[in-house]
Image (spheres, rainbow, N blue to C red):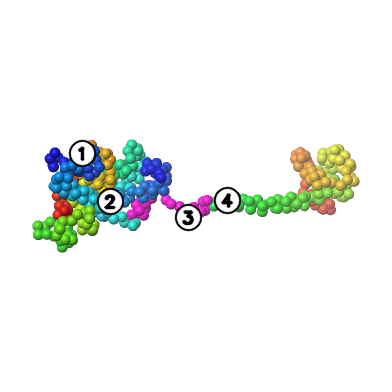
Amino acid sequence: MECRELREIISLSLDGEASPEEAGLILNHIEGCAGCRAFERKMRAIGTGVAKTEGAVPPDFREKLFALMEAEDLLPRRRSLFAFSIRWAAVPLAAAAALVLFLVSSPEKSKDAVSTQERLPAVARTGPAAETMQPSSPPLSGSPGSPLADDPRRETASAARAGAELTPEERDIIAHLDILEDPSALDAPGDIDEMDIFEPPHRRQG
Amino acid sequence: MRTDEELIELYRKGSRDAFEELFARYHRKVIHFAYRMTGDQARAEEAAQETFLRIARAAFTWEPKARFTTWMYTVARRTTLNFLRDDKDDRDKVPILPGEETDDGSPAIQLPGPAALNPEEMAWGAEIQERFVAALQKLPEGYRSAFVLNRGDGLSYEEVAAVLGITVQAVKSRIFRAREMLLESLSELLQ
């Protein structure tokens, strides 16, 4: 084979693209051909030289590129460590805050229950027995002429318990009896205003 | 270790880390390729930056019919071609080192000695690299890209053919022609 024909195959062999038969052909030829041997060496050197030809990588290349990408919304921005920490701490912090609020408000609820009891009129707190002991005090609900005052069930219950100690639950029920009554009945003409219950007897009119 | 294709898919789903990993793997290769193709450091940086921007923009519509590196080098080649077209008037100019012109105007460098040098053994210096860069710029773009992708970036003939959109036989021919032209340009450097 002519040297000129072999040079293209030498080029293939340098890139690992020659077949085993072609590689053997070259090996046999260059052993006896100084020209092709020199050609093969120069070709190999050129390939090495090009591989060594490299551009410099600027130290800020990455930062510049990523800044451009972030500006185009091509790259999600990195969150700061602070924001990252806050995000992950938000849930447990919120849970802790809720617990604290619950604990703080719990004693308030019991206090409210007590204060509510205390705010009840004396009549509600002491029950029907107290009413009978205070003849000047008006009935719990309504005036003598009102349907409520004439309720036989109430009179019977009052008489039956005249000498008995009332439980807190009973007192609570009595205190809220007026709520269970028909509101329109409370507005009957001539009725004493509910708020008059709290006024001293000497101030009442009619 | 995730493949390049897996990383691109993760990037599509919003993973910044995936893109950073791809960048870490290939940014040097892209810069070296751009430098070999343009022969200019500043243009190589611009071309490499633009290459990654184009990859990021196209990532969401890219269909993985080929390897990621094939696509990456295709984008890199087209990007550097744009830069070369912008410098079309300067493309035939050979970079001349100041104060080192010969009588006939051709560039010359100070060689270590009168004997011819073997690039595989000589100390690789800035002047030697400049000669190789200049010789590469003398090649037609088609020869240059084929030779650089194969010898510079290690792509096989088949991969080079995919990047350039030509046959393997055409790749063989272009690389051989590139070698012959470089041999002629660098003959004084080579033993």
**Magenta residues (range):** A61-88
Looking at the image, which is closer to me, A196 or B142?
Answer: B142
Q: In percent of the image, x 29 and y 53: which residue is there?
A: B45
Residue at numbered disc 1 = A22
Is residue A90 something one can see in this rendering?
yes
Looking at the image, which is closer to me, A203 or A176?
Answer: A176
| Identity, as a three-letter code, of the amino acid under mark 1 | Glu
Distance between the Cα atoms at labels 4 and 1? 72 Å
Residue at numbered disc 2 = B32
Q: Position of residue B19 (x, y in %)?
A: 38, 47
Residue at numbered disc 4 = A92
Q: Is residue A202 left or right of residue B9?
A: right
| Label 2 environment density (alpha carbons within 10 Å; few <14, some 14–19, many ≥20) | many
Residue at numbered disc 3 = A81
Asked if labels 1 and 3 share a chain, the reply is yes
Q: Is residue A107 left or right of residue A140?
A: left
Element class at badge 3 = helix
